Image (spheres, rainbow, N blue to C red):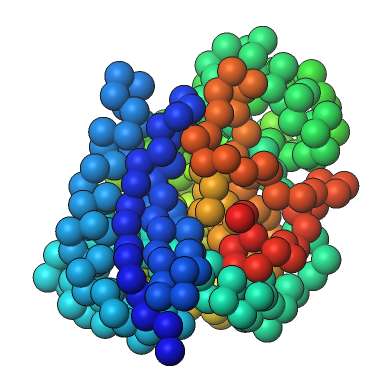
Amino acid sequence: MARIESVAAELLHDKSLVNVVVRVRDSDGVEGVGEAWWGILDPEQPGRTASPIIAVVNDMLAPQLSGRDPEAIERLWYELWDWGYRYADQGIFLMGLSGVDLALWDLKGKRLDASVASLLGGPVSDGIPGYASLPRLREPDRLVAETARAMEAGFTAVKLHEIDPELTALLREEFGDAVQIMVDVNGHFDPLEAIAVGRRLSELGVTWFEEPVRPMRDHAAIARVGESIECDLAGGENEYTLEDFDRLLASGALAYLQPEITKIGGLTAARRVGVLAELYNVALCPHNFRLGPSLYASVQWAFTSFASKWIEVPWVPSDEAFSFPVALPPMRDGLVLPLEEPGLGCG
Ligand SMILES: [Mg+2]
């Protein structure tokens, strides 16, 4: 039986946007590559905020995994989660565990020469709609230009991270109904402000309004906003445990659920959250803003659940790039296609 020989997290910072990559190598020389959450943006010192997450992998998890069976993913996940519980079941410990878990799934797929989705029963469909997720651009000209560029690349939907709803109005004026628009404000508003902005976004026919209020996990406030506006709400990228997601969904606030696979404990945890989305009958929309193993893992995961509705695909201006060397997943007619390469499918 193969044994785990090494586990290491590393910050890739060759390009303007960093990736936190986790590599697990076994005694047969097979290597799985995963990705942990990338940290809060720090333009002055890219990647600085990811260092505690990297330490979780290298200083805490790696010694626990040495010599273990790399294919026993469910068992390893539970043992690590149980062992690290005193660091809490949320936050940086789970982010580090996510990177390790994704690397183990990639490794298993490579060992068995099968895509991860095929190991989990095979893709549920031939394609899932993808939307281009634009970073916050602020400037109207750049917003129009990047939306046009994303549409030329085959996207039929874009997500904006603009807090000014008049920038959404500008895109609607420019492109009409040729593009679906989602708006994400990352918890920028208090509930009253969120209701006012949400009413304007409803007039503009947005597909969803994402993380409308701060604190971002104030489920009751999110529900209050939802009751006061016409458009649907999305959220969930800052939730962690199955219990967190259960409480959020029980509030009835969301139409679209967006778990982040690099925060919740990787694919092993994501599969359970996917079942919860099915139980509550909400649209599963894996959250992601990294071109790297985490996006590929999100695609693999999305194809395991009939609740999947949209896949977030990070889209950055041409003068920006992610440090992990991989192309966008294959798409056709606005749909992300199933990945056929072994493991997570990004090499
Ligand atoms: Mg978001």
Q: In the visual, does 23 lie left or right of 92? A: right
> Can residue 301 be seen in the rendering of this structure?
no
135 relative to 290, above or below? above
Q: How many marks?
A: 0
Residue 135 position in % (x across, y down): 54, 29
Q: Residue at x 32, y 57 (%)?
A: 8
The image quadrant where one finds the C terminus is bottom right
For the view shown, which residue lies furthest in the front direction? 28
Q: Residue at x 60, y 28 (%)?
A: 316
Q: Residue at x 32, y 34 (%)?
A: 47
> Can residue 16 be seen in the rendering of this structure?
yes
Residue 99 position in % (x across, y down): 39, 59
Residue 232 position in % (x across, y down): 60, 50
Q: Nearer the viewer, residue 263 or 210?
A: 263
For the view shown, which residue lies furthest in the bottom direction? 1
For the view shown, which residue lies furthest in the left direction? 86
Q: Nearer the viewer, residue 203 or 308?
A: 308
The image quadrant where one finds the N terminus is bottom left
Q: In the visual, does 197 lie left or right of 113? A: left
Q: Nearer the viewer, residue 149 or 165?
A: 149
Q: Nearer the viewer, residue 64 or 182?
A: 64
Q: In the visual, does 117 lie left or right of 228? A: right
| Image quadrant where residue 140 sits | top right
13 relative to 336, above or below? above
Residue 324 position in % (x across, y down): 52, 41
Q: Residue at x 59, y 18 (%)?
A: 319
